Structure formats: structure tokens, C-alpha cells
Image (cartoon, coloured by chain):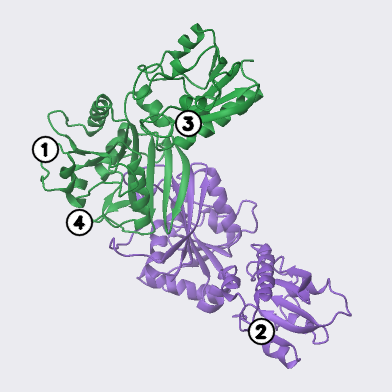
Chain colours: A purple, B green
Amino acid sequence: MLFDAIDKKLMSKAISVAARGIPNAFPNPAVGCVICYDNEILSTGYHQEYGGKHAEYNALKKISNTASGLTMYVTLEPCNHKGKTDPCQDLIHSSVFDRIVIADSDPNQKASGSIEKLRQKGIKVDVGLLKKDARKINSRFYTFHEKKRPYVILKYASTLDGFVADGDGTSKWITNQKSRMQNHYTRSTCDAIIVGRRTAMLDNPSLGSYGYGKDPKIIVIDPKKSLGRNLNLFKKEPIIYSRPILKNSPVKNVSLIMNDLYDKNIKSVLVEGGAKTISSFLDAGLYDELHCYIAPKFLGSGLNIFQGQRSINCELELELIETKIIDNDVRIIYRNLV
Amino acid sequence: MLFDAIDKKLMSKAISVAARGIPNAFPNPAVGCVICYDNEILSTGYHQEYGGKHAEYNALKKISNTASGLTMYVTLEPCNHKGKTDPCQDLIHSSVFDRIVIADSDPNQKASGSIEKLRQKGIKVDVGLLKKDARKINSRFYTFHEKKRPYVILKYASTLDGFVADGDGTSKWITNQKSRMQNHYTRSTCDAIIVGRRTAMLDNPSLGSYGYGKDPKIIVIDPKKSLGRNLNLFKKEPIIYSRPILKNSPVKNVSLIMNDLYDKNIKSVLVEGGAKTISSFLDAGLYDELHCYIAPKFLGSGLNIFQGQRSINCELELELIETKIIDNDVRIIYRNLV
């Protein structure tokens, strides 16, 4: 067997160390590293923030220059390219390390390739330990590189009976202030926010993270370029998608936008509505998480969150991963398994 | 000060002992009793099941005949009438007890009156310690006696966009089997279930508790007596509300039914739908808990749970008391604070 119980325990430690880098490492992956001698942990390190030193560097700096015969457990293949930091692969010497255990190879073609190089140095490299667990904490990163599109979070706030706005478009105050603050935090973890024309016009949102972190790039879907430039979001140089790039099919437009955002290196987007925009993403199936904020209200009529049409027997492959009570509101988070 | 910190600690113990009687004590209140000498607990007892011995009896039976100078902490005024058991008041003698501490007096006029009688025996009786906490575990009991109507739980299962049935009435399989089982348990804790005509006709439910406990009495609202007698629920001798007892206003009919069920000594009801029936109770404001089962589905059209009409600024005074993840469904329980 390639891996024994001690290997699993040490990689599990590396994964939990990696998770400390969430969300500050975004849009980089959260990576953890554990260095051992004879199964005893000598040091740990993780990628603390975007642009900062990598996990391997942070673990290595605590190790004596004269050490040898060590094993490294790292949750992602060490990088093999010079980006904001030097290649981690160069820091790993066969005089120090006998063995490197890697949870998963790097899906980013620009950064991968070190597994072969480390082997060429004469180091034993074992890949695939707790791969599923290691991938789970970096779902954004894997989605971007493997699906060639941003990681997509759909967020909406509705009444218990499914309405996101009154008949006259009033929608700003469905959920409570704490719920809205919770979403401001989510904004700070995303590269960009997408809103549709109607939301931009009726809510005139500023779409900031209100001090929780960086403000995401704003993206607005405005097919006919009909939005007035005095709206708040135009103060922030948004990306605007309009015709003729957009076509008549909202579902196809979602694909077009996702492809373009991949080319623009936008790794995660929060789609904040309105109902038509959210529904296009739901119908396209192009989303990874669904954040539903539900307020204890009933409206009876208005704008329903879902503008499509489905049978009651149509099961979405959604996994409920969290419910959070926010005073009398609740947030439900689903993961799209497709 | 009437009560000190030790009193509070001992009454708190009595309340936690009382809670063990939920739900088997229903429709009786869950009551707990702690007997002490010099602040040291000698015995505890609680009302274990409907028809069984009361908390005071269960605590007293563990006490020596020759004991004296004791204090009793009990979460509800000892009963003063002969029901299924002898009056507890008769069991409490001044030769044994110096002091009785009671969380709250009994709102049931048939059973109350012992506070005065115990004082006449020369026992010091202090009432009102942790009253709010003690009432909380018996909200059904207090609602029935103080509001003169059954404790009402509204239950529905909807999609995320608020629909309880397809356009053609199909609604049986919105939530998963575990969710339905969870509701079967709730049925077993209620005296009766109410359904409307449409639900009886389209779903033809049997409305049992499927082995979780007793089957509740079935109540069906059938204004025109138009339901076919071959439906499952007619096998169980339901209570049927029809014209001319029912009037043209569904909201007023809710009050009429509640008054009649109070007279029939039905202490708790689970209203299982459909949308029109639930909406009548919501509009009447006559409910105590709202159990929302939500499935990760979107329909886009169909029968919405709320058939009324409200403004987005209309805040219901609902307190969210629990969310429960049931595989990929979620159950949200609200308490109506009005």
C-alpha cells in the first residue's frame, strides 16, 4: 500500500493547516505543508494570503539547514513556475528530503510539472493521498482550472413563499441587516459580482464589501445598454455585457459570459440577481453554490425567484451543506453536484 | 428577596427534570419536582406519561415516611382535583414540608386552588420562581387554558420558490422520505390533524403517525360536504366542519373551528394543508408554530403556499427557533410571538 495510517494522519494535518488560508489566499488555492522526521512533525506552513509566500516556504523556513532524511506532506503539487514568488520546487532538495507526499497534482498548467522534476532529483514522490478532502477546500481553484470558468455562487433573498420583490419592484428590505452583512462578507471573498439590468436599475446597489475585505469587480448584464450612467455601479468601472456579444438566449449568454470571464482571469463570481439573472444561471446549470437567504414573511404575489418552468419530479442535484440562523432569517447553502 | 441563587438552581433542576416528560405527558403538562433537605436534593420526579402518576407523587415515593423540614420545588402548582390520579395537594403534609416553591400557578381552573390550601396547612408557599422558563416547556398547555383554543402547528412542504403543488395538484413528493417521517413524529405528539377539502381529495392521505405513537384525530374542512366517503380519512371517523356551521369567511371559520375544538377538549392540532387552509390560519393569526419543510427544487409555477396578499413591509412576529437538516431538505420551525 502506497500510504499507511500515519501518512493519512499527517496529510490530514496538512489539510487542516491549509484551511487556515481561507479566504485570504483567494484566488490562489489554500495549501498546507507538514514537514516530518521519522513521522514526527518538525514544522508546518500554509499559504496565508494572496501574493504572500507559499506553504512549502513557510514550513521550510523553520527547518535547520543541516537537516536530512525528511518527509514533506503537501496538499497540492509544489509550484514549478515563477509567479509572485519563486518556484517552490527549487526549494526542495534531495539532500534534505527523502520523500514528498502530495494530495493532488496542480490543475493549473502554468504551475504544474514539479512532480517529475522532484523525481529526477532522486526524491520519492507519492501522489493522491486524501485527494478528495484536499480538493474540497479548494473547490474554487479546481473549478476555475478544470471547468475553465469562474466558480459561481448564486445568491438571493426571498420570502418563505419564494418572492424576491414586491409587484412594484421593491426588494431592498426582504432580509434583515445581519443577513445583508453576511452577504457583504461573501462579496469580499469573490473576484466579481454579477447583476442584471433590472436589479441595477431598481435597487441601484453599490455592491461593495462594506469593510469586510476587497470590493469585487462589478459585472452588469445590460443587453440594450439602456442603464443610466448615473447609477452607483458605474462609479466603479464595471464590465458591461451587451449586444451584439449577447444573443437572444439568456442561457447561452451565461456560457458566453463565463467563457469571457475565464479569459479575463476572474476566478469567482457572486451572482446577486435579480430573479431573471439567477434563473438563467439555474437553467444553464452553470453554478457551484446556491446561497438562499429566507425571511419569515409571506407576500402572496410579486416577483418569484425562479422565472423558469420545471416539473415537480425534476430533482436538482444539490447537496445541502449548511444552514445558518441569522436572527429570524435563515441562510441555506447548497452545493451543485453536477 | 423571595428567592436566592440556590432556589434558582434547584428550580432549574426541576424544569430540566420536567422536560423529560415531553412528549409522553401530552396533552398533560410536563411537570418536574425536586425535594430537598437543607438545600440538598433527596429525590426528583416527573410526570412521565399521560394518565400516569404526577411529578410530586414520583418524587415523594422515594422519601422516608419520617422525614420532616423538607422543601419542594415544583414547576407547576400541585393539582387540587381528582382526575386520573388523586389530588397531589393531599400528599403534601406540613409535618414533612416547611416550604413549597412553585414556578407558576395552574391556568386550568379545574385543577388549581392548592396554593391557598397548602398555606392553610401552615406550609410556606412561594410562587413565581423561573416562571418564564417553566412556561416555555409547556407552551401547549398554557395556550389551551389561557387562549381557550388548541395549540396550533402549521406544517407545509414547499419548493425553494414557495410552491406546494404542481399546477395539476401533484404535491405528494416535494420533500424526501425522512422529512415526511419527521412530520409523522410531530403528528404523534398532537391531538388532531386538520386538512382542507382539496388536500383530502387530491392527496387522499391516511394521516397516521406510522408507528411513532398515537394516531391523531382527523379533522377535515369540507364546506359543501362534497368529499367522497371512499377517501382514506373517512375510515377513521373524522370530525367534519361544513356549512351551515362554517360561514363564507375562511378567517372567521378558523376562529369558529378553534372555539369548537376547545369545547371538544382537543388541546393541540397540526394543520397540514393545503395552501388555502394554511393561509386561512396565517391570515387569522391563530397559530403557535410554523413548520416549513423546504426541498431543493424550483417549479416556476403551481400552487403557492400563501394564498393571501401582503406588503413586503409586513413583518410577521415570528421567532426562528430551529433549523434541521434532513438530508438535502431543511425544516425551519418558527414560533409565533403574537
Disc 3 to disc 2: CB gap under 8 Å? no
* Disc 1 residue type (three-letter): Lys
Between the residue at mark 2 and the residue at mark 4, the CA separation in whole angstroms equals 57 Å
Q: How far across and down, in percent of the image, does residue A301 sit? A: 31, 46
Cα distance, mark 1 to mark 2? Answer: 75 Å
Between the residue at mark 4 and the residue at mark 3, the CA separation in whole angstroms equals 50 Å
Q: Amino acid at mark 3?
A: Tyr
Task: Left or right? Give the position of A255 relative to B269.
Answer: right
Which residue was labeled with disc 1? Answer: B224
Disc marking residue A126: 2
* Residue position for label 4: B168
Residue carrying label 3: B46
Looking at the image, which residue is at 34% across and 56% down?
A: B175
Residue A22 image offset from top left, x and y in percent: 64, 63
Distance (Cα) linking label 3 and label 1: 46 Å
For residue B284, say whether it is visible: yes
Q: Does B183 sit above or below residue B240? A: below
Callouts 4 and 3 on one subunit:
yes
